[in-house]
């Protein structure tokens, strides 16, 4: 299992009229977690794209557990439970750092697409090679 945690501070612009983090912001937080998870494997979105691939979103699911507020420091935990065979599903948990309270959890599902043809395919060898050591 490949897991990485990163932190983000809630900006005032991330909150809504109820002073909660706006629900749509959590997808952005998931993206931060996903980007850092991939970066931790030695890759980056730039590398994936320069190799001719893209990772469009197929599905997203979120469960809101407890509100987060302006200036909270959140921990975004992103986990890739298995080496992707076709689709790549990344699970997320967002915790408030001050007390480790679960704020939100969910997942996103992606597919590898050849940049030029926009056709889905299996994950490229360079990606599998970058993540395989986490699954020994």
Image (cartoon, grey):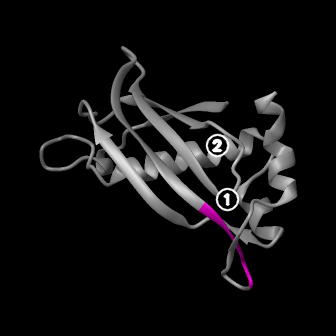
Q: Is residue 7 left or right of residue 35?
A: left
x and y, in percent, of residue 92 in the image: 48, 38
Local SS, label 2: helix
The residue beneath circle 1 is 86
Residue extending furthest toward the top: 99
Say whether marks 2 and 1 touch (CB < 8 Å).
no
Q: Is residue 12 left or right of residue 108?
A: left
Q: Which of labels 2 and 1 is toward the front?
A: 1
Q: Residue at x 75, y 59 (%)?
A: 123
Cα distance between the residues tagged 2 and 1 = 21 Å
Q: Is residue 58 above or below residue 132?
A: below
Q: Residue at x 44, y 60 (%)?
A: 59
Q: Is residue 2 left or right of residue 64?
A: right
Name the image quarter holding the N terminus.
top right
Q: Earlier in the sequence, mark 2 or mark 1?
A: 2
Badge 2 local density, few (<14 within 10 Å), some, or many (20+)? Answer: many
Q: Which residues are magenta?
A: 111-116
Looking at the rendered structure, which numbered label has been put on residue 36?
A: 2
Name the image quarter holding the C terminus.
top right
x and y, in percent, of residue 12 in the image: 30, 45
Predominant secondary structure in magenta?
strand
Q: Is residue 89 left or right of residue 24?
A: right
x and y, in percent, of residue 31 in the image: 52, 51
x and y, in percent, of residue 41 in the image: 77, 40
Q: Residue at x 24, y 30 (%)?
A: 66
Badge 1 local density, few (<14 within 10 Å), some, or many (20+)? Answer: some
The reply to whether the magenta stretch includes residue 107 is no
């Amino acid at each position: 299992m490949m897991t990485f945690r990163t932190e983000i501070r809630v900006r005032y612009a991330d909150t809504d009229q109820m002073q909660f983090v706006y629900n749509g912001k959590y997808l952005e937080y998931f993206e931060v977690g996903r980007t850092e998870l991939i970066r931790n494997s030695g890759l980056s979105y730039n590398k994936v794209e320069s190799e001719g691939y893209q990772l469009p979103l197929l599905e997203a699911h979120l469960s809101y557990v407890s509100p987060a507020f302006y200036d909270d420091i959140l921990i975004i935990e992103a986990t890739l439970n298995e080496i992707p065979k076709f689709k790549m599903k990344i699970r997320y948990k967002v915790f408030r750092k001050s007390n480790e309270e679960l704020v939100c959890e969910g997942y996103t599902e992606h597919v590898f697409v050849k940049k030029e043809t926009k056709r889905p395919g299996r994950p490229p060898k360079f990606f599998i090679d970058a993540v395989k050591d986490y699954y020994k």
